[in-house]
Image: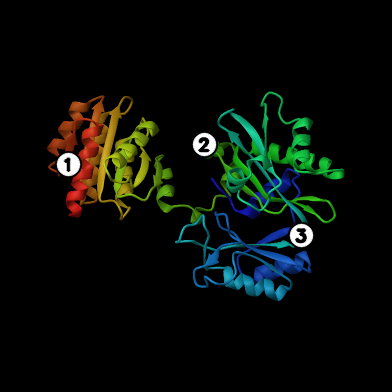
Amino acid sequence: MNIHEYQAKELLRGYGVAVPRGGVAFTPEEAASVARELGGPVWVVKSQIHAGGRGAGRFQDNPTGKGGVRVVKSVEEVASNAAEMLNHVLVTKQTGPAGKEVKRLYVEEGADIKRELYLGLLIDRATGRVTIIASTEGGMEIEEVAHNTPEKIVKVAIDPATGIQGHHTRKVAFALGLEGKQVGAAAMFIQAAYKAFTDLDCAIVEINPLIVTGAGDILALDAKMSFDDNALFRNKDVAALRDEAEEDPAEIEAAKHELNYVKLDGNIGCMVNGAGLAMATMDIIKLYGAEPANFLDVGGGATKERVTAAFKLILSDSAVEGILVNIFGGIMRCDVIAEGVVAAARDVKLHVPLVVRLEGTNVAFGKQILADSGLPILSADNLDDAARKIVAAVKKEAA
């Protein structure tokens, strides 16, 4: 789960991470009020969407105008810029051409920036440890730095048995070229960020840029936090920060039915049980010249109702021109899948080719249910046969 910048800064502030003062606004009037409360002479008005590249982005109705992060020098300018941004669609390299509508802003006090650095924390899958990533190249995407100047990145893995230690923070501080009192300030900053990461079950904490001010202070000028969905039950306050307007409606609906769903750009819908089998199913669809429209794992213990919901979810995507159901019944019973498929197909008045491959527990019962349904369902003997059939059926329909 992702949250907005202002929410991330509020959480980090609670752990002692130094961030500039600011306030959220939903109207131009609220933006001006926040600016007056903060005091001048410089403010930054920031669009709050779940995407990076806001400053370099452009609004759909004014593609040659200013971006989604603006530095202004009067309360009047705060209000006028807020009016230009709120309820308008911002397009960045991370949103895609559709962009995202800006529904809230963050008005922040200006900062005297002397240096821009990068600091991030994430789980390194290779080591299974929380790892600090730091670079002197702040303000840039870390992927670009890794590609162009990898020598400017330092990584420090934290042993969970000991937690973060002084030598970890000193290594990062020295790698960033900090000196004097900045080293101590950076140590407290990093320790606080690490505690927030572990306490809140984060997937990512990214401070980009981490700045050194003219006075030598260390501040998080921007902040991004992402959380492990599976651990949200332990952090109800974090879960309450979810902004569903920033998420795919289909993925929200899937979560209500305990389905793992991700929309893709293809035209063949997939319903599979098991993430590995789902990946293999998508791969073989591509092998035979088509593209999957989604990743959808119904899980090992799906009910008839969950299968029906999954089927409806796939068909809610107008790009879907055919569906492949691939089920290996271990815990999952093939007859339950078949009942759900038949019920959903009748309910939504199936209008695209459907290929079903069943194998495992109660497979004979499942196939019989499909055969007796009277629906135009193509049966497949194995995954290869299923992929060939659905791709051929879709191409035939297109022709």
| Residue 304 visible to the viewer | yes
Depth order, front residue of 174/65 = 174
How crowded is the residue under tag 1: few (<14 C-alpha within 10 Å), some, or many (20+)? some
**Which residue lies at the image location 60% right of the left edge and 46% below the top edge?**
148
Whole-percent x, y for residue 371 in the image:
13, 36
Q: CA distance from mark 1 to mark 3?
A: 63 Å
Q: Nearer the viewer, mark 2 or mark 1?
A: 1
Q: Which residue is the site of mark 3?
A: 111
User: Viewed as shown, does residue 74 lie left or right of 183?
Assistant: left
Q: CA distance from mark 2 to mark 1?
A: 36 Å
Answer whether labels 3 and 2 touch (C-beta < 8 Å): no
Whole-percent x, y for residue 100 in the image:
50, 61
| Residue 350 visible to the viewer | no
Say which label, 1 or 3, has the lower sequence index: 3
Whole-percent x, y for residue 125 in the image:
55, 31
- Please tell me the numbered disc located at residue 377: 1
Q: Which kind of residue does numbered mark 2 sit on?
A: Asn
Say which label, 3 or 2, has the lower sequence index: 3
Q: Which kind of residue does numbered mark 1 sit on?
A: Ile
Whole-percent x, y for residue 381 in the image:
19, 30
Structure colour scheme: rainbow
| Quadrant of the drawing holding the C terminus | bottom left
Q: Nearer the viewer, mark 3 or mark 2?
A: 3
Compared to residue 124, the image places residue 398 above or below, namely below
Depth order, front residue of 233/167 = 167
How crowded is the residue under tag 3: few (<14 C-alpha within 10 Å), some, or many (20+)? some
Q: Which residue is the site of mark 2?
A: 230
How crowded is the residue under tag 2: few (<14 C-alpha within 10 Å), some, or many (20+)? few
* Secondary structure of the residue carrying numbered label 2: helix
Depth order, front residue of 55/79 = 55
* Secondary structure of the residue carrying numbered label 3: loop
